[in-house]
Image (cartoon, helix red, strand yellow):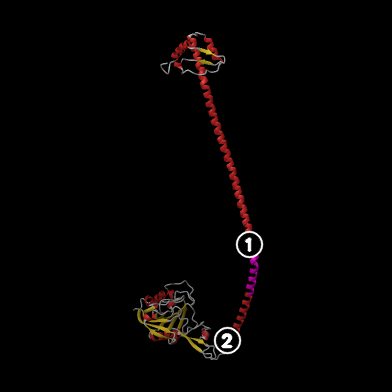
Amino acid sequence: MEQDHMSFNEIVKYLETEFAKNNISVHENKNISVSVSDDHSFIKKQAYDNWEVHSLFQSLGENPPKNKFKRIIKRLSRKTMRWILDPLTRRINFFNHSIINWLEIQENTQNDLRHQLSKEINSLQKDVYDLRNSELKNTQEKLKILEDSIIDKYEPAISSLQEKLSSLEESIIGNCKSAISSLQEELTALNTSVLQLKDPYQHINQLNQRQGFFTWRVGYENAPIVFDLDLGKNHQYNVAFVNERILELPFVIHHLDKSAVKILDVGHCESYLPLYLASLGKKVVGIDIREYPFEHPNLYSIKGDIRSNILQENSFDSVIALSTIEHIGIASHYGDRTQSDLDGDRNAILEIYRLLKPGGQLVLTVPFGNGVGTSWYRVYTPESIRTLINGFNLEIMQHFAYSIADLGWKEVTESDAGIVDSSEKTMCVCLLSLRKPN
């Protein structure tokens, strides 16, 4: 053949020619062998094993008609195509079914594995939970055993210690009772001894407890000199301390205006001074937050606070404030239980200024030193004292410091006074005479 592809008519023509030239043999085993010349060896195959094909070729005879031959060829072509395509189709279908089956098997296998893995995980979790509970239970049992062991081991020691403590407590109580009884006996003997004394000073600051003859009316009198009672063989009184009163009273009497008639004494409760001045014919008004126990025709005592504005303005010739201003505004043992007033001292000075007549005099004494005070009085410095008296004209300012060695007071300069420590008791005092401007 001169070409690879022919039309159907050409194939039919060619086959007609070839059937005429070549031998076509039909075997008894129903296999058709088609032999072609060597020049056309491309047609070489086994025909489909079908008796109908065998019959078709027999019906052709030696010279089959052309039309009939064409029909047979068409039928043969259809049979051949089925012969070729049916096995292929079956193989494809078989392959598809095989793939589907394989996928289903894989999916089932995965599901089985997943299920098995889930079961193993659940089993493992249960084992872990059981193991944890078992370990926890074992630990609790061990702790219980250890606790019982410790209790058994130390309980006798604890009981013994408790017994010793109880015995020690009883011993201490017994010893304290004995000591207290002994002290009470000694105190009774001491009281008896003191009461039997014939000393003329027994009513003055007895046992340094201020049990003098003012006790029944005042509670105590702030005397200038404090005595100690020596309970030795001679029962002597010794000077323990000389306070600032030894300076303040003479300073007032010396510098108070002789022409002053109406005088106000601020904080007069622990002082004899109102009685002295009243006895000299002065008209004295005393004001204190405590009651004054004594009376005099020329003395009028007021229980109240100087800051309360209860007195008439410009009504006094002179005002005296001895060791008082430093306490005002501080809740102290002097009876002032009101709320603290940090500016109480300055407010009191302003009220005194209001009460004084123009040209009136203020005699003032306060603790002086490095500025460190206590919970019940202030200590003034060179700066704070001038702030306190601002508005007054300064006439006299003196500073005295206490000498422990000499048991007395000595005048010092303001700079020396400013370094004195008065935080435990007043060891330096500032004495002032001030004048309200006209």
* Residue 258 position in % (x across, y down): 38, 86
Position of residue 354 in the picture relative to residue 99 (left or right): left
Q: Is residue 152 above or below residue 266?
A: above
**Image location of residue 319, percent across then percent down:** 40, 80
Q: 49 or 411, which lies in front? A: 49
Residue closest to the eye, 22 or 154: 22
| Above or below, comparing residue 58 to residue 393 in the picture | above
Residue 430 figure quarter? bottom left
Quick check: can you spot residue 282?
A: no
Q: For residue 309, which quarter of the picture?
A: bottom left
User: Would you name the residue on which mark 2 appears?
Assistant: 190
Q: Secondary structure at mark 1?
A: helix
Say which quarter of the image contains residue 251.
Answer: bottom left
Question: Could you say whether the residue bearing mark 2 is in a helix, strand or loop?
Answer: helix
Which numbered disc, 1 or 2, marks the residue closer to the eye?
1
In x, y percent, where is residue 209? 52, 83
Residue at left 59%, top 44%? 120
Q: Which residues are magenta?
A: 145-167
- Counting from the top left corner in percent of width and height, residue 433 is at 37, 82
The residue beneath circle 1 is 147
- Would residue 111 be seen by someone viewing this image from the given angle? yes
Q: Main secondary structure of the magenta part?
A: helix
Quadrant location of the N terminus in the rendered image: top left
